[in-house]
Every structure is written in structure tokens, then in C-alpha cells.
Amino acid sequence: MRNSSLTLLLAACAVAACRGTDLGAPGAPRLAPSFAVVANENDALAISANIQAAHTPFGTVIDPIFASGDSTSADFTRLAGYSRAADAAIWSGHYLAAEAFRYGATGSADALANVRREVKSIQGLVDVTGTGLLARFAAPASSPYTAGIVSGEAQHGIYEGTLDGATQCWLGNTSRDQYTGVFFGLAVAYDMVPDAKLQKRIRKTVTRMLDFLLANAWNVPMPPEPVSTVCPHGTAYDVVSTTFLQRPEQRLAFLQIGRHVDPARYAAAYLAERSAFGATVSLPIETECQDPHGSYYKFNIDYANLYDLIRLEEPDSPYRLVYMNAYRTLRGCTASHQNAHSDMIDRALSGPDVSRDAEVVSLLGLWLERPRRDWFTDVSAEYPPLCDGHACEPVPVNERPNTDFLWQRSPFEVRGGKNGTIETAGIDYILPYWMGRTLGVM
């Protein structure tokens, strides 16, 4: 563990103190005194500092659990454990992208240090498995928090590995969204941070993941049932946890990134895949757009994959138009969802738009009014769920339920959350904010 729990807690509390009363605490004012109601750099920097202090005890991003959700209790800021570890890979990738865009916009030494740490941590998720498989999460077996974290995610399979000479417990059952988040973050960092040593590490990590996927025909097999004397027992996945066979746009996006960081190794594979399946990239997206509510996170995955697939395609390639047509299908069914992250992807791929860009600034300002803890929220009285059990129009950002990454959740949900003990990282603010700064929106 990079920091002791006491250091984490004190640092997290220090960041919390600088923003005043917790925005989501029962009875708290709508806005803390030190928060502006418009998107701004100070809040982005405070969120990054808090992520480093409280959300990266093992390098990758997870969320702290506090002993109480009652803001008047002495236990409100007492660290009790960590949660959401099964999504550490995807959100670490998104966090990496945020810090990389921050470096691109500011040249900050702090952002560069965060990028380097996160790339190394993501590499660890690949190295720890020993095969090139991406783990969902890994932590030292010696940490007092590890058993509780992985036992809470035992349904994904708990395996033993070694990293930097230390025994680790890692989570399997790796899904397509975990791969997407990691590839997305690595590709952004490769382009935003022109550091040869860092790019070499990114290239190595991309290569190991891609070679594993290609060697397994785009399936993701898990190891056999583990035998460990130090890690808790979990469900064994001696089967394929997921497959990319039905997702041509995801296969092409990963190979596109591979071709970008190592053309000699992957250019031929990308061109062959593009020739065989490039014309079909819109098919799964057309299907997903038929249901705007179910598994809403699918759209976040689509945006991430199409972002790299399109931006890295040659301007004069006939396939760029094919890919853009698939993207327009996605944009056509989500553009009205008041989503700052997808709006920034659209800015990158489609260019400036005064109305959309102004919406991003407004949405991020509303984000600052949101609670940082997962208190239960029910706004069904204000926004009746009259459209297939959902609100008929997007719920305002400041009234949506707290979650891990707001932009992967349906804007039409009217209730959600728990008891206020889990703190969200805030990547859903800093990623569109710094991307917007890089693109000249802020």
C-alpha cells in the first residue's frame, strides 16, 4: 500500500475541509461556500488531489467506504474499507485519460506524475496475471484491506499472483468494458504526453493485452480454479468470461490503438480486420440504440471505442466515413441526453458547436452541486417515471443519483443510491473538464 490508512484519511479530510460542508449531507446547503457554480480549474485540481489521497491506495482507482453516512457522526470521515474494486480497470483508464488531458492543457508536473503512476498501475493489472490477461483489480495480499475488498467481489473469481516481488490477490471475470476503459486511457496518454519512457511502457502494456486477445481469438479465458493460501476463495472462472467476436468496432478500436503505438507489429492485423469487418461496425450500435434505457453503460463503451477508432484513422481513408456513419447513429440516439463526456467526444470528432459546447459548461457546473456520497435519491415526484418506468426527459445533472461515473448511467433514472458511506471519485467531472480545456471549450 502506497499510503497508510491514516495518511489517506487525513488527506481526504483535508480536501473535504477545503470545500466546506459536504454537498450531499442531509441538511447541508445546496452548495458549499467555496464552490463556484460554473466549471472551474480549482475544483478540478481539488478532485484530482482527493483521488490521489483517498481513491488510489493500491494505484488503481477504487472508492473509499466510510463508517457512517451521517454527516453529524464522528464516524463520517472514519475509513472503513474500499468498494467498487471490480471496476478498477475501467475507471483507472478514464482517470488516466483525465490526467493526460490535464497535462496536455497545462503541462502540469503534478498531472505528469499522476499519469506515470496510473500507467504503471494499469500495467500491473496485466503483469499480475502472468499471461497478458487484464485483471479487474489487484492488491497486495498483505494489506489489511485486501481480504475485505476481494471477498466483496468474490463472484468474479479471486486469484493469486506476484507483482514486484509481492504476492497479490487479483479479480478475474474481466469484461469488455474493463478492456475498453484501459485501452482508451492508454491511447490518450500516449498522445497527450510525449515522453519516450512513458510511451514505451504504454506500448508494452498495449502489446501484452492485444497479443493475449489475438492468441485467444478475441475471447477472454480465465485461469483454472486457483489454489491460494493467502487470498480468499472466490468463484473460479475456468471458462471464457467474455468475447469480442460480436463487436467488430471494439476489435478494430483496439487494433487501431495497437497500430498507432506499434505499426510494425499491428498494421497488417488492423488492415485485415478492417477489410473483413469494417463495413459492419454500425450493426451492434444500431441494435443498442433501439433500447435507450437498458444497460445504459453500453453507450459509454461505444463512445470510447469510436473515439479512438475514428481519430486515428487516416483522413483520406474511405473507412473513416464508414466509422463516422456508425458514430452518427450513436450520436443520433444519445445527443439529447445531457452528457458532458459524450459531448466532449463529439467535440473531438465533429468539431465546434456553440450550443453543445455551452451545454458542457452548464452540465459541469451542475455537477459541482451533486453529493459526493451515495445517499439514496428519489426525484420521482418531480420527474414522474411515465416513460417505461423512466423520466420522459433527462433529469437535471444536479438531481441525478450518485454513482461511480455519472455519464455511464441513464439520465432518465429517478431513484438510486444507498446510505451515504461510499464516496465517488469525481472522474466524471475532471475527464470532460480537462478534455474541454484541451479542446478550447473551457
Image (cartoon, grey):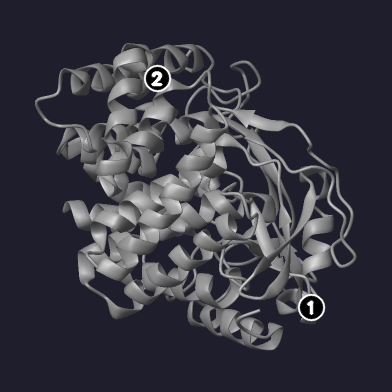
* Tag count: 2
Question: What x and y, as percent, mark residue 195?
Answer: 25, 68
Horizontally, is 369 left or right of 59 in the view? left
Residue pictured at 48% horizontal, 22% vertical: 247
Q: Which amino acid type corresponds to the residue marked 2 in the rendered image?
A: Cys
* Amino acid carrying mark 1 in the image: Asp
* Res. 26 visible in picture: no
* Quadrant (top left/top right/bottom left/bottom right) for the C terminus: bottom left
Quadrant placement of the N terminus: bottom right
**According to the image, label 1 marks what residue?**
75
Q: Which residue is identified by label 2?
A: 333
Q: Position of residue 369 (x, y in %)?
A: 48, 58
Q: Secondary structure at mark 1?
A: helix
Binning the other alpha carbons within 10 Å of mark 1 as few (below 14), some (14 to 19) or many (20 upward) gives some
Q: Which label's residue is closer to the chain start, 1 or 2?
A: 1
Q: Please give the name of the residue rendered at 57% of the width and 59% of the height, measured from the top-left corner.
A: 127
Question: Closest to the observer: 39 or 58?
Answer: 58
Residue 274, placed above or below residue 157: above
The residue drawn where x is 37% and y is 17% is 281
Residue 391: quarter of image:
top right
Q: Which mark's residue is nearer the viewer, 1 or 2?
A: 2
- The x, y position of residue 10, in whole percent, is 62, 87
Residue 124 percent coordinates (x, y): 56, 63
Q: Element at badge 2?
A: helix
